[in-house]
Amino acid sequence: MKRLLTPLLVLATSALCLADAKQDIKAAAQKLADAPSYSWTTSTEMANSQNSPAKITGKSLKGSFALITSERDGTVTTAVVKGEKGVLKTDEGWKTAEDLRNAGGGGGGGGRGMRGAVLLRTRPPADDVLRMVDKTGELKSAEGVISGDLTEAGAKELMSWGRGRPGGQAPEPRNAKGSVKFWVKDGQLSKFQVTVSGTMSFNGEDRDIERTSTHEIKDVGTTEVKVPEEASKALGS
């Protein structure tokens, strides 16, 4: 009987540790979401590429707006999101993804191209992590970092994220896999990193992609978020 109970006890303990790690991350992300405000930066590196995406800077206000920007070659692209809605600043004013899609992806200035599509799909880190935890397998804690692998479905979803024109459909990834790392300080999410890789087809050509995005959180509770009135109106708020 003792020989039987020992492996059962080990399995039960392992399952409990797995659940605890996920709950710890969810609690840390929720604590960040409950903060009055915070800022973050997202840096992305593409393996075997000299043209990594521009760094993203964001400011989030609890239960309200997030102001998100990126800059490259002196051109600033700006979006405002609230929940699942978002608007992008263009030469013709603030436009939703549907507006841009109906205009053929144009809009002029910062409203054109991949960066605009990426910003419209960007959500504050706390929101991202709360959704992401359920897309992971086993999470382990070591040396202050909680890490693990994404499920295949989770890796596919995150590989497709941000690709194609605003509101468009991304090509289906193949052989998708990924991993995540979370850093928690004083019970609150302070940083997380996502690496995804796989094969995607663009214009009939297969490309192997490996992307690592690092999200760093700062100025929790002290960030000021000033959203242009025109953007608020465009969002219906």
Image (cartoon, rainbow, N blue to C red):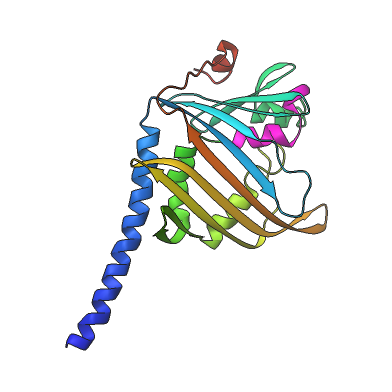
Q: Which residues are magenta?
A: 107-121
Extreme right residue here?
A: 204
Residue 126 placed where, x, y %?
44, 38
Q: Is 144 placed above or below 164 here?
A: below
Place residue 198 in its image quadrant: bottom right
Residue 196 placed where, x, y %?
61, 55
Q: Inspect the magenta stretch and tell me whether residue 114 lies in it.
A: yes
Quadrant where the N terminus is found in the figure: bottom left
Q: Is residue 126 left or right of residue 108?
A: left
Front-lying residue, 188 or 68:
188
Q: Residue at x 71, y 40 (%)?
A: 53
Q: Residue at x 33, y 42 (%)?
A: 187
Residue 139 placed where, x, y %?
42, 60
Residue 195 placed where, x, y %?
59, 54
Extreme left residue here?
A: 1
Q: Inspect the magenta stretch and tell me whether residue 75 lies in it.
A: no
Front-lying residue, 189 or 101:
189
Extreme front residue here?
A: 143
Extreme top residue here?
A: 229
Q: How many marks?
A: 0
Front-lying residue, 233 or 28:
28
Type of secondary structure dominating the magenta stretch: helix
Place residue 115 in its image quadrant: top right
Q: Is 88 placed above or below 55 here?
A: above
Q: Residue at x 75, y 31 (%)?
A: 105
